[in-house]
Amino acid sequence: MAHSLELITRLNTKHQQYQMGRGGTTELTWDAIAAATCGLSRTHLLLLHMLRGGATSDERMEFRGWLNDLVLRKIQDGGKKPRRGLSIEEVAAGVTTIALYSYLHAAGQCEFCGGDGLVASLSAKKIEDLAKKLSSNGRLTKGSKFEIKNPDMENCRHCRGTGVQPWPYRARLQMAGWINTASNVGPVQPKMTEDNYRKNWGEYENIAFSAIKLLENQAEEWLLWHLGIIDDD
């Protein structure tokens, strides 16, 4: 199945065509893809341009502004107050930078889910069934196998279902400019500690990250449906 970025990238090359079919094989032209994007919001298009590396500096700033406003509203609604002299606006700007950079520049493949973004979910009943297979001394009973067939799947909590490895907390604080990394500067008290960020502000990074992911998913579904690559059932 085609990916939204593959389709959007074709808007740069009018002479390329894409083969697909609903009830036969049809050629997707540049004009067809461009027409399908007309139903997308400005924010969706800005993100797609950024993901394919074709956004201008003004477009990047516009999308960043939209995301920053979202993060700021969520922080204000949560009622948390930053410490170490940072304002709420500065925290929102830092969280926005971290979430956006992390989304656009993955640190690598998630080692917990192998890049799938999904892991097996152990329900209470399955855990109980597994426990029954174990003897009182903690060993498997004769003939039993410690395995789960057809497990339920859920988003990997380590990578937030993206399949990519999250950046270390220190790297995230550096992205936001909260840790001074200049080699010619002595020890400086950081504006934000890893522990403080993890406990108080990491949830807003997850909100921003999820908002970006939702936009991409919505854009992809819209394009694939309107181009006849997927059905609506």
Image (cartoon, rainbow, N blue to C red):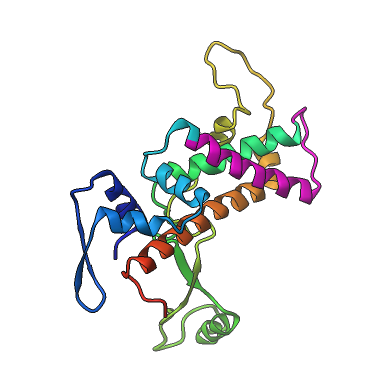
For this view, does 88 lie left or right of residue 11? Answer: right
What x and y, as percent, mark residue 148? 44, 80
Q: Magenta stretch containing residue 83, yes or no?
A: yes
Which quarter of the rendered picture does the C terminus lie within? Answer: bottom left
What x and y, as percent, mark residue 164? 43, 51
From where the camera sits, is residue 159 visible?
Answer: no
The residue shown at (61%, 47%) is 205
Q: State the extent of the magenta-drawn residues as a range.
A: 59-86
Secondary structure mostly seen in magenta is helix
For this view, does 41 lie left or right of residue 21? Answer: right
What x and y, as percent, mark residue 219? 44, 58
Where, by quadrant of the figure, is residue 182 drawn? top right
Which quarter of the rendered picture does the N terminus lie within? Answer: bottom left
The residue shown at (69%, 28%) is 191
User: Is 140 or 93 nearer to us in this picture?
Assistant: 93
Q: Magenta stretch containing residue 108, yes or no?
A: no
From where the camera sits, is residue 17 visible?
Answer: yes
Number of numbered markers: 0
The residue shown at (71%, 40%) is 196
What x and y, as percent, mark residue 44? 48, 52
For this view, does 38 lie left or right of residue 229? Answer: right
**Vertical relation: 39 (above or below) 130:** above
**Vertical relation: 223 (above or below) 181:** below
* Residue sticking out furthest to the top: 184
User: Is 139 or 48 nearer to us in this picture?
Assistant: 48
User: Is 129 or 70 nearer to us in this picture?
Assistant: 70
The residue shown at (43%, 60%) is 113
User: Is 229 or 211 nearer to us in this picture?
Assistant: 229
